Amino acid sequence: MKKLLWTNGILCGLILTVHYTFVITAFGGCVISGVTPGIASLCGVAVILLALPFLALVFVDFASVFVLWKQHGIRAFAPLAIILLAFFVLLVAGFFGLALGQWRFKNYMPHYEEVATGIEMGTLPMDEYGRVATKHTHLSYGQPIAYREEDGSLTVEFFVGAMGPPPKHIAYIYRSNGIIEKGSHTAERWHNRAKVNEHWFRVSD
């Protein structure tokens, strides 16, 4: 019983530490650009790998209730309770990450607008792959990506996070005409979209 409790506590503590580090670095961008993506990616892989023993432990804890009930009574639910509490805290991390990302976007909105305006005016040129060099390296992972639709409207993508499994990218995008037309390149790239203001959307694939 004690060994099972210790195993649960250590594994859950490890998962929560790694997961919250991932949430803060991926959604908060609290580490210098260029370092953050590496930390976030490493933590994301670690969370996926730790999920396998976590699920195995859930099965063991559930089965142990029936085995330990006669000897320990209500205390037989303790290992399972630790797992359920850890799962609840993981859900809280998701909401925390979303709120942190939204706060960060609003805080840096003038910088996002400056980059989008610079591309529209031609003062921030795109390379052959649509990448844009900007001094505001804290706005996204790597360089923003810009392209024009067939009607000439501009899209600028700022990658701000990732999650999984399966791998899902999260970005804020600028649309010069304020809409994402059905069948457009932007719509095909980003299936989940939520409008933030007149020209900006929060999207994921």
Image: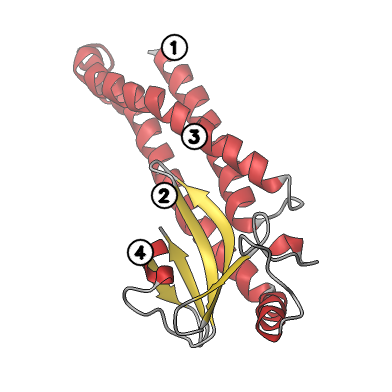
> Looking at the picture, how far across and down is residue 122, in whole percent?
72, 81
Instruction: Please report whichever mark, 3 or 2, sits nearer to the chain's N-terminal start.
Output: 3
Residues at badges 2 and 1 in contact (C-beta under 8 Å)? no
Answer yes or no: is residue 190 visible: no
Q: What's the CA distance linking mark 4 and mark 1?
A: 46 Å
Nearer the observer, 85 or 54: 54
Instruction: Please name the amino acid that badge 3 sits on.
Output: Val
> Looking at the picture, how far across and down is residue 70, in whole percent?
20, 13
Nearer the observer, 54 or 62: 54
The relative height of residue 198 versus residue 109 in the rendered view (above or below) is: below
Instruction: Please report whichever mark, 4 or 2, sits nearer to the chain's N-terminal start.
Output: 2
Q: What's the CA distance linking mark 3 and mark 2?
A: 14 Å
Residues at badges 3 and 2 in contact (C-beta under 8 Å)? no
Asked which secondary structure carries label 4, the reply is loop
Residue corresponding to mark 2:
91
Answer yes or no: is residue 104 visible: yes
Residue corresponding to mark 4:
191
Residue corresponding to mark 1:
3
Q: Badge 1, how many Cα within 10 Å: few under 14, some, many 20+?
A: few
Q: Nearer the viewer, mark 3 or mark 4?
A: 4
Q: Badge 3, how many Cα within 10 Å: few under 14, some, many 20+?
A: many
Q: What's the CA distance linking mark 3 and mark 1?
A: 23 Å
Q: Nearer the viewer, mark 2 or mark 1?
A: 2
Residue corresponding to mark 3:
47
